[in-house]
C-alpha cells in the first residue's frame, strides 16, 4: 500500500509531509499522534459529496494492510 498525503496552502505552496509514498501507519500517526492508547486500528475518512454520494476511505494502521474505499456502501 502506498498513500500520498498533500495539502495545497493559501500561499501557493504544497505541504507534503511524506514525499511520494507513505504507509498506512505513517498516515494514522500523522492524524492521531503516537501517544493514543490503545492505538487505533485504522483511520476512517467519510465524505458526503454535493451530489449526496457517501465516500468512505479506510486506512489501516499498518505497513502491510490494505486500504479500502466504499461509495454508497459498495467497495470499489
Image (cartoon, helix red, strand yellow):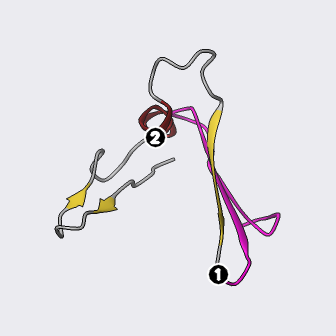
Q: Position of residue 7 (x, y in %)?
A: 33, 59
Instruction: Provide the secondary structure element on which disc 2 rests.
Output: helix
Callout 2: few (<14), some (14-19), or many (20+) C-alpha neighbours within 10 Å? many
**Front tag of 2 and 1:** 1
What residue does disc 1 label?
Answer: 50
Expressed as whole percent of the image width and height from the top left, the position of residue 30 reads 42, 37
Q: Is residue 38 above or below residue 65?
A: above
Height in image: 71 above or below 28? below
Residue at the front extreme, as displayed: 10
Q: Along the polypeptide, which appears first: circle 2 or circle 1?
A: 2
State how far apart marks 2 and 1 are (Cα).
Answer: 26 Å
Displayed quadrant of residue 74: bottom right
Label 1 secondary element = loop
Residue drawn at the location 57% of the way across and 32% of the way down: 61
Give 23 or 13, whichever is nearer the viewer. Answer: 13
> Camera-side residue: 47 or 4?
47
Left or right of 3, for residue 43: right
Instruction: Judge from the rendering whether residue 56 lies leftward or rightward of residue 16; answer left or right.
Output: right
Q: Position of residue 48 (x, y in %)?
A: 68, 69
Could you tell me residue 4's position as x and y percent? Answer: 40, 55
User: Which residue is disc 2 drawn over?
Assistant: 27
* 52 in the magenta segment: yes
Residue span colored magenta: 50-76
Magenta stretch: residue 53 in it? Answer: yes
Amino acid at each position: 500500500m502506498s498513500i500520498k498525503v498533500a495539502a495545497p496552502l493559501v500561499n501557493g505552496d504544497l505541504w507534503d509531509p511524506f514525499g511520494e509514498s507513505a504507509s498506512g501507519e505513517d498516515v494514522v500517526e500523522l492524524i492521531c499522534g503516537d501517544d493514543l492508547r490503545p492505538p487505533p486500528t485504522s483511520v476512517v475518512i467519510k465524505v458526503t459529496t454535493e451530489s449526496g454520494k457517501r465516500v468512505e476511505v479506510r486506512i489501516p494502521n499498518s505497513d502491510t494492510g490494505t486500504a479500502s474505499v466504499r461509495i454508497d456502501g459498495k467497495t470499489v
